[in-house]
Image (cartoon, helix red, strand yellow):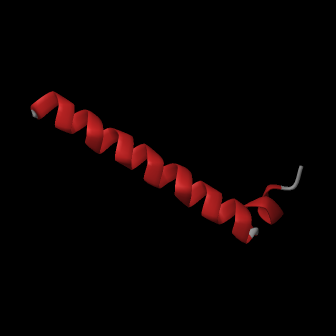
Amino acid sequence: KVRGIQTTHPKFLTRRKHLLVAKQRVKSEEMKWRWG
């Protein structure tokens, strides 16, 4: 597998960004539960 092509693919990038945003959202929700 060639990783360079995968990472430069726009679809892959948007999907990765989506995952990151989702992770951050879960983290913030956890914090709310913990401190709220």
Task: Left or right? Give the position of 36 relative to 23.
Answer: left
Give the residue at x 16% y 29%. Answer: 34
Q: Quadrant of residue 9?
A: bottom right
Residue at 49% across, 52% down: 20
**Vertical arrangement, residue 10 with respect to residue 17, above or below:** below
Place of residue 5 in the rendered image (x, y in percent of width and height, measured from the top left): 82, 65
Direction from residue 5 to residue 22 in the image, left or right? left
Check the image and report above or below for 7 versus 1.
below
- Identify whether 17 is placed above or below 28: below
Say whether residue 34 is left or right of residue 26. left
Residue 27 placed where, x, y %? 32, 40
Q: Position of residue 18 (x, y in %)?
A: 54, 56
Where the C terminus falls, by quadrant? top left
Residue at the (46%, 48%) spot, across then down: 22
Image coordinates for residue 33, horizontal then vertical, percent:
19, 31
Left-right relation of 32 to 25: left
Q: Residue furthest right?
A: 1
